[in-house]
Amino acid sequence: MAACDSSTTKEATLYKRLLNSPRPQYPFPDLVNPQVDSLFSEYCQWIDEDGQFESQRARDKHKQHRLCDVAARAFPAMALEELRPVARFTAFLAIIDDYMDTASQEEMEAVKKRVSDIYTGLEDRKPPAGFYRQMYMLRHDAIACEMPPHLYQEFIDSILDMMTGYGEEKEYNAKGTPPSIAGYQEIRRQTSGGICYARYLCMEKNYRTLPDTVLKHPTILRMHSLVGSLIGYHNDFISLPKELARGGDVMNIVMVVQNELKLDLDEACARALEIHNEALDELIWLQNALPDFGEWQHTAQEYVNDLGVLVQGVYSWHTQSSGRYAAGAYVEPEYQADGKVGLAQI
């Protein structure tokens, strides 16, 4: 308990110290879906019914984090039934990442394999209460809101890529040594969930009608990658005090920059923000310099504008509506590989 108290005190000090440090700023609209409260009610019910693999303390904290609000802010024009799949993904992939924070890459791969079987329908029987039931419901919610099969496939492929990245992050954390900046960037753009969100944006408004000549164009795919990077970077700025205080997490842009360039903390924060801003400038430039998509030009332009709304929404959750980023708010991992609290429990 004393060690935990010490970590929380250190975390509080770091939050206070870094509060006025330069932070990302975005020129995009900051919007909230009017279904935000209805979605939150459902989210609490999901945790009550399918979060029993966690302790009551952990479940209470995850409710306070309002992970469902990430989706509600990123996709302000979606109907509630369209929000459900992406909200389940957001909430329960974050919860399982917290829960299995100290798991090995092999253990994460085992979870990913079963998730893949559920998403593709290879495992089609509804699982008992727990994490996997939420993954099953994600698939069925996507079918219910008529997500086109090819867009659903791309969405779940991005989730599985994210889970692969989770395992890679855990390998670096286990070693306690940050990767190179380039290695970090490759992993972090996957694990931030931003690419998953960019793929799911096709379900907002009339974007599901966009053809592959638009959605798979190199310019659009580059913007998806930049969204993944930006969300990873700004998450790292907000979570830095927690990660510095508790230790064991080296996959943070500031720590990576500090380690590779041998800078002090303030210098590393400044350089990390420059890296963030370079990605932001590129995203904005691409938004304003779309290729000629012919009859799809107007819809494509609206889609890429909403990629900016998405980035702003995720950032606003971090800074305005999440209870996740305060001293002592993190849910410490409860997973144990010795079988007492193992894979079968989730």
Image (tube, rainbow, N blue to C red):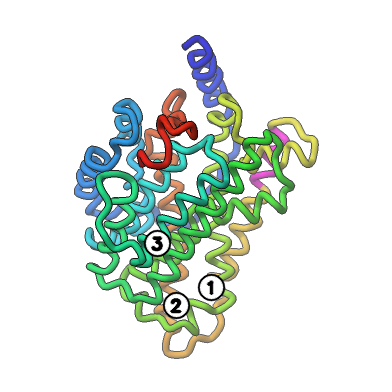
Any mark on residue 300, and which?
A: 2
Query: Which one is in front, 207 or 52?
Result: 52
In the orientation shown, which residue stands out farthest toward the front?
A: 339
Query: What residue is rendered at 52% in x and 43% in y?
Result: 235
Residues packed near mark 3 inside 10 Å, few (<14), some (14 to 19) or many (20 plus):
few
Q: Which of 102 and 306 is in front in this view?
A: 102
Residue at the top extreme of this rendering: 2
> Is residue 211 in sight in this rendering?
yes
Q: Which amino acid does label 2 sit on?
A: Ala
Residue 9 vs 173, above or below: the answer is above
Q: How far apart are marks 3 and 2 (CA)?
A: 33 Å
Residue positioned 63% across, 35% down in the render: 174
- The residue indicated by pointer 1 is 220
Q: Nearer the viewer, mark 1 or mark 2?
A: 1
Label 3: element kind: helix
Disc 1 residue type (three-letter): Ile
SS at circle 2: helix
Q: Mark 3 points at which residue?
A: 117
Q: Give the range drawn in magenta.
A: 266-273
Q: Position of residue 254 (x, y in %)?
A: 66, 39
41 sits left or right of 237 in the view: left
Name the amino acid, label 3. Asp
Does the magenta-highlighted stretch encompass residue 262? Answer: no
- Neighbourhood count class around disc 2 (C-alpha, 10 Å): few under 14, some 14–19, many 20 upward: many
Q: Name the spot of residue 158 as percent of width and height, x first.
A: 48, 62
Up-down relation of residue 329 to residue 258 (above or below)? above
